[in-house]
Structure formats: C-alpha cells, structure tokens
Amino acid sequence: MQQNTVRTRIFPIGDFTFDSGETLPGIQLAYETYGTLAPDKGNALLLFHALTGSHHAHGYNADLPEAGSFWRPENHSGWWDTMIGPGKPLDTDKYFIICANYLGSCYGSSGPASIAPDGEPWGSRFPMVNAKDQARAQVMLLDSFGIDRFYVVGPSLGGMLSLCVADLCPQRVKSVISIGSGYEPQIDHQLCGFEQVLAIELDPDYRAGRYPLDTPPNRGLALARIICHKLFVYQKGLAERARKGVCDRKGMLTWYEPTRNTESYMLHQGTKFALRFDANAYIRIINLWTGFDFARFSAEGDIDAAFRRFARHGIPFMIFSISTDCCFSPESAEQFHRRLVENGVEAEYKCIQSMKGHDSFLLEPELYAQEIAAYLSR
C-alpha cells in the first residue's frame, strides 16, 4: 500500500528559558501536521510521541536533514500510521493533528546534537529538559497556529506530558487520552534510568558528553537501550519474538558470541538503536521520564489539587492500561483512574489484553482503535 509523503516543518522558538533557569538561543521544534485546521480552529489534536520516537507519526518521510544520520530507514514510516488518516481513529477528515519532536531529542528539535553558536554541538552543555519545558514549548507551537482549544493524546512518556499540558492550560484542553502511562514513574524504573545513564557515562568514548558526532559512544548507548528494552517487552513472550542470527557483533563484543536467540535479539536491538539516536539526547529523554514529578510540576504542588482543577475545567480523561505492561502496571493505571474520579474528574478506564508489553500501542494499535474512535466521538 502506497503511503502518502509528508514533510517535517520547523517552528523557530528563538530564545527559550528552561525550567532550570538556563536560556539558549535559536531553539526550534520539528513537527508534522495531518488533516486541515477548521476555520474556527476547534478541531486541533495534540499528539505526543513515546520515549525515543519522533514527530513523524503518519505517512512516509525519508528526508529530515535536521536529524542528519540519525534519520534511518526505520524512521521513514509513521509510527502510528494505522491510527491516523481518513476514517481512522485519529480521523484526518475531522481533526487537525499536530505532533512535535521533544526538546533535547535528535530528530529536528533542538538538542545536544544541534550546533551551538560556537559552531560545535551543544553536547553536555545542553540543559536537562523537564516536563514543564516540553509542555511550554508545545503550547507555544499551538499558539503559533492561533489554536485556543485542543484534544490531547499521549502514549507512554507522552501520557505524562499530557498531564503537564493540562495543568499548564486547563481551560484550553478538551480531553486527554493517556495510554500506558501515569502520574509518576515507579521506583524500579527510576533506578533503571540511572543504570542507563551509567552505561553511557562509562563508555570511554563519551568524553563527558563532548564527543565528536562522528565517534559517538555507541557501546554505552547500545547497552543503555538493552537495559531499557527489557521494560518495553513482555519478557515471557520475548523468546517468541527473538530470532537467531540477527545481530552484527562487530564493534560491540570482543570474544563472547551470543549462543541464545534472546541474547542475539537484545544485542541487535541495542546495536540498531545506537545508530539512530544520540547518546546525550538519550540521557535527556531518559531523565525526562525518570525525573517526572507531577506533584512538583503542578501549579498547586499537589496531585489531588491538580486533579480537582481538571474537574473544575471539565477535562474528561480516557485511561488505557496494558495487561503485561512492566512500565506502568494495570494496578497503577487503575489507581490513576480512581484518583481522577475521586477528585471529580470524568474518567473512563480500559485495560488492553496483550502479550506485547508496554510497546503494545506501537505493535498492535488495532487493539486501541475502536475504543479511541468511540471515545473521541463522544
């Protein structure tokens, strides 16, 4: 089936002051849009991507010069293509969908791999980016279109950022769909994030984050991805997903040769990822997840008070959990839903039965399609 070709646009923010207090010049966001903005601008839908995803959610885009060599063939097809388009759950005949790459990433938005005024990559000089920074930047993009009110859809990390957008401007949010997410990361995932940072830091090629882009710390980044990937897949089903003989161990291992297909599979995933992402950017995005603290980021400094404000502004929620999710368990999602309801928020809840783990929303979007379409139609 021929995919329609789309192109990335760049929104120039200019000087941007991060929540840390640091100000950088020339900040920009890469984004794509799908559908047509209505004359009254009332059909806008802000779509967030997952941890190491991109703004390219739909169609085919083989050309992103701003991403350099990180934009590889596996990035060319939209990550939620089966969910977006005419007659699909995110119906482009009804909605004007905006998806932007996160600050600190490496797919066109400003990040550590971007060139600083001195002609060198920002590297470790690029600030750590938190959820409040992401929310403000994305709302600035919406403001550039003159969009006053909008829907929000956020899977994984995007679900956490959806909360921050709703907290930043509750009077503007029509509804929130949160998929495989919550209002705080679990402690084991916070520690797992630190392990990933250590894997990168301990690679001799990391050079305190000031490495040349043509000699990156790929071993450390590959190991970090392997550590992380264990959380995204349902480990009881990993053996079925793993294939023998798919990895190229050159440059990664010295004498040890994987003898089990699960080892080969994980090594392949890590090696492949290290070619399509920047190590400094990965540290920022991982820290964005593990450092998420909605209680601290909210205007009230209190989760229940923030949820009560959502209720006063009439923001309805749809919460999806995944039965085999190791990142946000169904129990934590049920608690999220219950806490919303207890604070007066109109909220629905659905647990998707899947053997794919946290990545289910990417690997089998058809399981979510009917529920999302029905919810938006209501």
Image (cartoon, grey):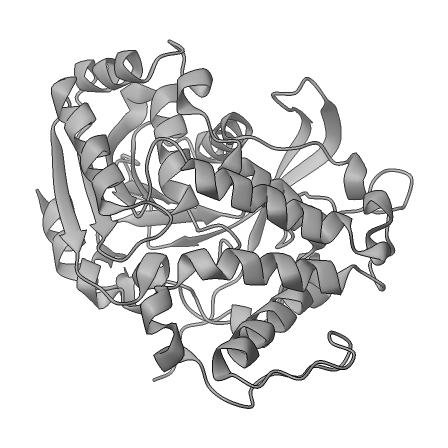
Q: Residue at x 26, y 15 (%)?
A: 304
Labels in figure, total: 0
Front residue (pair 134, 282):
282
Q: In which quarter of the image is the N terminus?
A: bottom left
Q: In this view, does 264 lie to the left or right of 174?
A: right
Q: Which image quarter holds the C terminus? A: top left
Q: Is residue 47 visible?
A: yes
* Residue in front for this viewpoint, 96 or 25: 25
Q: Is residue 113 visible?
A: no
Residue 260 vertical placement versus 55 (above, below): below
Residue plotted at (69% across, 43% down): 111
| Residue at image coords 87%, 49% | 207
Frontmost residue, 317 versus 261: 261
Residue 123's place in the image compared with 245, above or below, is above
Give the percent coordinates (x, y) of residue 19.
60, 21
In the displayed structure image, the side of residue 143 where residue 197 appears, left or right: right
Q: Position of residue 150 (x, y in %)?
A: 30, 34
Q: Which of 132 and 209 is in front in this view?
A: 209
Q: In the rendered view, does 189 fall on the left or right side of 280?
A: left
**Which quadrant of the view contains residue 161?**
top left
Residue 158 % position (x, y): 40, 43
Residue 190 in the image: state x and y as whole percent: 51, 38
Question: In the image, is residue 248 above or below residue 289?
Answer: below
Quarter of the image where one finds residue 83? bottom left
Residue at x 79%, y 56% (from the top left corner): 203
Which quadrant holds residue 339? top left
- Above or below residue 177? Residue 170 is above
Going by the picture, which residue comes out furthest to the right? Answer: 118
